Amino acid sequence: MSEHRRKPPQPQGGGRAAARRGVPGASSGRRAAPRGATGSPTSSTGSHGAGAPDDGDRSYGGRAEARRAAQRSGAVGAGGGRRRAADGSGAGRGGAGGGRRGGGGPNGPGRGRGRGGHEPRKKRFIDYPRADKDGLRRWVPSWRLVTGLFVGFLGGLMAVTGIAYALVEVPKVDEAAKAQNNVYYWANGKPMVATGGETNRQIIDYDKIPVAMRTAVISAENKTFEDDKGVDPMGIARAVVNMAKGGETQGGSTITQQYVKNARLGDQSQTFTRKFKELFISIKVGRTVRKEEIMAGYLNTAYYGRGAYGIQAAARAYFNEDAAKLNPSECALLATVLKGATYYDPAGSPEVDPAASRDANTARATKRWKWILDEEVKDGHLTAEVRKKYTDFPTLHNPRSNAQLGGQVGYLVDLAKAYVINNSGGKITANDLQQGGYEIHTTFDKSKVDKLEKSVEKVRKAKIKPKERPDKDTHVQFGGASVNPEDGAIEAIYGGEDATKHFTNNADQTGAQVGSTFKPFVLAAAFKDGTRAKNGPEVQEAQRTIVNPKSLYSGKNELKIQNYDGTVWKDREGKEWLQTNDGDASYNAPTYQIDLREAMRESVNSAYVQLGMDVGLDKVKDAAIASGIKENSLASANYPSFSLGTSSPSAIRMAGAYSTFAASGKQNEPYSVKEVEYKGSNVWQHRSQTKRAFDKEVADNVTDVLRTVVEKGTGTAAQLSGRQVAGKTGTTDGNKSAWFVGYTPQLSTAISMYRLDDNEGNKKREFLEMFGTGGEEKIHGASFPAQIWKSYMEQALKGEPVKNFPVPQPIGSVVGETPPPAPTPTPSKTEEPETSPTPSPSDSGPSPSPSDSPDPGESCADWDWQCNNNGGTSEGGENEGSTGGESPPATDEPTGGGGNNGNDNGGWLGGPGG
């Protein structure tokens, strides 16, 4: 075989692989020629300048690979020429590697330049990115680097932890655990009462704390208390995750951490800094303080609700006995309220949160109370035999035992506290107020509060005799509120006999229906939106007619109520609605036509139920809400009886809504707190936001019609000497509640009366009938409520300048047929207590201008139906909740238009009443 076809032997240097590994002298070509061979096309340039192939074939690996190999190995002279002379005599110049090209044959040596000879790279302390890797591999850290960083991190963390642990100081208990008072001020700046803080805290020794209390808390909150070192790592991790997610920050804390938070840290904020500090103090306390001291400290500083700090104060507040005498059942209840008294105190805190009602809290507390007792059995703290003894929920003491909160003060404090919590935008929480230190400046006028209380008690003592009439005069309740029309400030309330004896604030929402005091909202809707046309659905909304007070409606008893399109209204069962009047009275036979002013004056149900249907009950609802009534206190607007007041707003909200009419249509939200200070700095301030609820002519015309009620209608008992008064009486179906709501230009006041059996043993919370109550055959809004209103307002406005209502501008047009001259409306079946006036010459003509309405003190012409000379009372025509015909389904509306609508959560704030 010829020499040029013979397979050459493998190079001794290891070939391409060796070159990659950086072996000195390794050839960069694929094959090496035999020593001494010349002119062979397969000969290659060695590391000492052998010529490259002249046929143009590239050496294996090429220049780039050779260069990288040289860099890795640090070898000198690696690489070879790219070409050689045909005779193989070329040699590279430059002793450090082959030239770029080989020699050119016999004409001379090759001119290639050497490219080797680089110095090795210096090693870095942290080899990242990695120098000996290519591409993405350069950015993948080595295991040495990862391990080193992890060890360094742990070391640093341990160093920081050690330093923090060594530097943190455990605060003294006596300096941090001393809760401060909240001071409440009257509107004139004088102190009303100081609540909370050390006034209801007693520290007792560990051996006086019942064993059952200690074990109940351990089973409920920290089963590892006896063994842990003050913290629960899993609980901390859970809390950190929750904080990162923006969720709840409670949970996971040990008893030691709770003790540190309550007794040794004055800052109760849920921030990372405070949590970090709490953690290290807890670790230190857990290692240096005895468990007995921690347990006693926790139970002596924790807040149990009802203003009680510490186990001894809690035992007094809930059971009226010393802590040492508590049984396991009572201890389990106190361990229950530690989870959060707002939602677990069976007495409830609806003024703070509607979800914290008495029923809801009782259900929550009962469930957790049972669970704690069962957990104690599982943990071996309580035997099954002892557990069987406690199947009934423990009997509780009244929630207001603090004498300072007696009378009306307790109701005022609850109202102000709830208002701050619900309207400060989260700046002041219930927990903040529990810690104390706040100065709360209220809108309450002490003089007016005292006068309202005296006016109610005067009637109660004179008329309500529970011992003489136990079946008629028991469970009688009164409520009241006064609101300033100018800005909505609540100046006075009457919440009940005594805040330490009767715990429901009667000025807030109680569930008592308002009856015909709701009719002014129907009239306001008719003045604002008008009645709908009855000539086809397509034009009903487009053709609305604003009504005039002289618009005519039927005063017939058992009136068949029509829809706005003229069809007869029927319930789901297809039965017609027949609307009755009080005493089954019909007015103005045989035509039965009565104008809206007179119908309001006599509180004629049939006329206003039909007016509500013509306007649209949705518009009536809108008018009530615009006035200031909260939507969640309104009954269903799907039945005609909605116009008769089947809703149950609070006395505060009713006074506020009527003040919108007094202010000529400007609405202000009722409020009870002007500003709050903390450590001398203002932290929150009320800002009134007046809204335009009605045009001036609408509100002023409603006021003018309501003046008629007081001057010569069902509300004459509320007349004030020398002052203009507008108002409305209200009585509900079944005579279960009665109201009078009235106002002058300076003050709007609502008074309610009802019978409500809401004792602890009565789960139904029933409203009772008032037939025979107070020795009266029937309770009307014109009786006791109007009498209380008059007595109070005479004193409250004493010394105030006399102001008159604005003269209303004419509004709307007369709707309904114009009747022939007729006598003054007279009930066809019952007599009015007062003498009917002589018919007015203008009854058949145009309506007299509202501005012609005289002041109460002026003399009156015999024919003037707008004027009242005798000042007598009229209680006829009052059956504001009564309906005839078939009742709507009980699931959607109270039967017959009466009864409780079941909504006890609205409050005057639309939530917590405040």
Image (spheres, grey):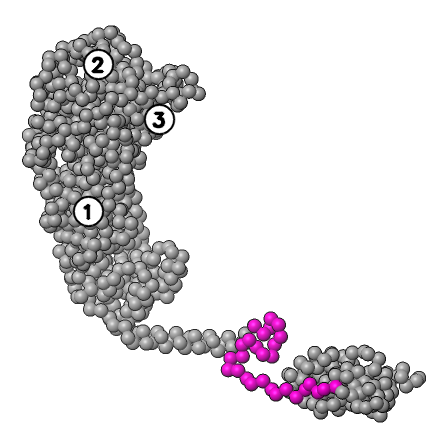
Q: Earlier in the sequence, mark 3 or mark 2?
A: 2
Task: Examine the rendered structure and indicate whether residue 109 appears above or below residue 354.
Answer: below
Q: Which residue is mark 1?
A: 674
Q: Which residue is mark 2?
A: 585
At numbered mark 3, what does the secondary structure look like: helix, strand or loop? loop
Extent of the magenta region: 112-140
Q: Residue at x 28, y 59 (%)?
A: 269
Task: Examine the rendered structure and indicate whether residue 385 appears above or below residue 177.
Answer: above
Q: Residue 377 appears in which quarter of the rendering?
A: bottom left
Quick one: which residue is furthest to the right in this view? 1
Q: Earlier in the sequence, mark 2 or mark 1?
A: 2
At numbered mark 1, what does the secondary structure look like: helix, strand or loop? strand
Task: Examine the rendered structure and indicate whether residue 310 appears above or below residue 559.
Answer: below
**Disc on res. 638:** 3
Quadrant of the snapshot with the C terminus: top left
Which is nearer the eye, 103 or 446? Answer: 103
Q: Main secondary structure of the magenta part?
A: loop
Closer to viewer: mark 2 or mark 1: 1
Amino acid under label 2?
A: Ala
105 left or right of 477? right
Circles 1 and 3: CB atoms closer than 8 Å: no
Q: Residue at x 42, y 20 (%)?
A: 539
Q: Position of residue 207 (x, y in %)?
A: 18, 64
**Disc on res. 842:** none
